[in-house]
Image (cartoon, helix red, strand yellow):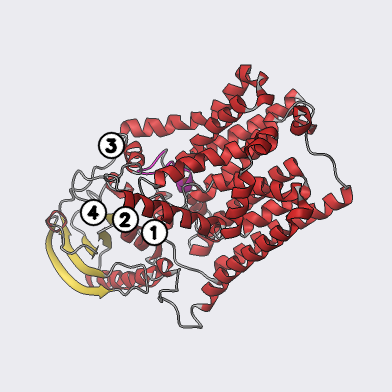
Amino acid sequence: MTEALNAPRAPSDPTSEAIWVRRAIGLIGALAVFRLVWLWLVPLDLVPDESYYWDWGRQPAWCYFSKPPMIAWINTVTQALGFTTAPLMRTPAVLLGTVGLAATWLLARRLWGARAGFFAVVLGATAPGSMALNTLLTIDAPLIACWSVALYALWRALEPAGDGNASGAGNRTKWWALYAAAGLLGVLSKQMMLVLPVLALVFVFTSPADRQRRRSAAMYAWLAVPLLALIPLLWWNVRHDWITVQHTAHHFAAEPWRLTRGLNFAVEFIGSQVGVAGPLGLGIFVAAACGWRTVRADRRRWFLWVMCVPALAVILAMSFRQRVNPNWPAVFHLGGAVLSAGWLASAWPRRQKLWRAAWITGVAIVGIGYTLVLSLGPLGLIGHKLDFTRRLRGWEQFGADMGAIKARLEADGGAPVIVVACGGRQLASELAFYMPGQPQVWLWTPPGVVNSQYALWKGPLPEWRGARALLVVSEEELPAGLAGGFDRIVPLTEIHSTRKTALPSRIRILVGENLQTWDHGKPLK
């Protein structure tokens, strides 16, 4: 009985399989084209995280204040290619999203056939969170692509002997190598990738059909390969007071627990996951993950269950203690989509109506989202409380305005003017991206304080000693430590922003004359 349950899927009608394969490939390709066109059709401003990581790309390193280096390296490549506008800069988000969706399709197809593969593509593409994933170039884009590829390769490497291409040692090595490569790149993308080899061990030690694998030294060696990516990250952190580790640990710090706060956090987290996966998508996943006996009896379902449910349960438990970011469990929804697709396809006649309701609801939600973005301008809703893109507006115009002031100062004084921001990393990074010529922008940080990557980079001295500076300040008072570095500070103007944009409510523009000292942060050694 166990052998039958763990056997590979039975072959189906080749004609039907080919139809579902064509549908899936066509949908993946059409989505990629649409998403690339969308970047140009609605060129929304970069969110602060995007511009921050873009600025990292101008100074390649092995690690950064809060994250591994992959997102910075991607930006380094796009900058070398001359991708200086927001749509071009975001192109990798679409490409990486397409890779992740294709790997999800391959895994579902391998496990349950081409129909299930198509279902997985639709579930992934109609999840509301896919809009942001394939528009914004943040660390989640490379992480999810790497996780998807590694998950598919891991299953192929762990398939029972005799399952198609996985039967030979050489073929199995091929899949282990793909897992290792994706895992290495994933660890260089985000710390969450370290969870995958742990979950793989949990699967091997809880799957009755995998008892013999537990004695395989080669399996342990392959699973551990992604950990090698920690070497440059740790080396960098050793030289910089373990700042990335300190920042990561900060995410798990919480105030003294109170029941009402914990319940509010948990409800907020669950609501965010409904928003990420969609109401019916999340509901189908919950239904597919239930039924302990059937899940444990089917090796395919157990593999996917282990790859998502335990981690989601841990994050849910954390949400009762602290606020959890909606994107933290994103990678675990990938296995959930495949599990859901298999659950639907395995009892197709009975679940056909549920499937129809799921895809119609998903398409409607995503369609409404895209339509709303397109309609905000014609309907006069830009900046309205219904405008969920407010965080992506205002920076381009602000950068152009600051560029005009800088050009005027340089024309009057006949010498270059440097740009100094004070009040937050988002101010510095957005100015760096959106000011004409994309100049170097320095962010002043109180001496000894390390709260962003800017505090680890050197200041403008000694190259710019004696220079004039355009000071862009969003703090209430101009810090004495910054003002004291100049002979004289001359106020120019103030900008008062409304809630219609992402800009701080009050920004003061000043000129610093004759820069002499710069004491800030804790620059790199």
Q: Amino acid at mark 1?
A: Pro
Crowding around mark 4 (Cα neighbors within 10 Å: few <14, some 14 to 19, many 20+) is many
Of marks 2 and 4, the one in the foreground: 2
Residue 274 location, x and y as percent? 52, 57
Q: Is residue 288 left or right of residue 398?
A: right
Q: Earlier in the sequence, mark 2 or mark 1?
A: 1
249 up-or-down from 489: above or below: above
Mainly helix, strand or loop, the magenta region? loop
Residue named by callout 1: 48
Residue 269: x %, y % from top left: 44, 53
**Residue marked by disc 3:** 525
Q: CA distance from mark 3 to mark 1?
A: 27 Å
Secondary structure beneath dot 1 equals helix
Could you tell me which residue is drawn at 45 percent across and 47 percent down? 72
Q: Are marks 2 and 1 in contact (CB under 8 Å)?
A: yes
Real-space Cα separation, disc 2 to disc 1, in angstroms: 8 Å
Whether the residues at callouts 3 and 4 have beta carbons within 8 Å, the answer is no
Residue 1, image quadrant: top right
Q: Judging from the image, what secondary structure is the residue with disc 2 in? A: helix
Q: Position of residue 195 (x, y in %)?
A: 50, 35
Q: Nearer the viewer, residue 283 or 424?
A: 283
Q: Which residue is mark 2?
A: 425
Mark 4 to mark 1 CA distance (whole Å): 17 Å
- CA–CA distance in space, label 2 to label 4: 9 Å
For the magenta stretch, what is the residue range? 63-72
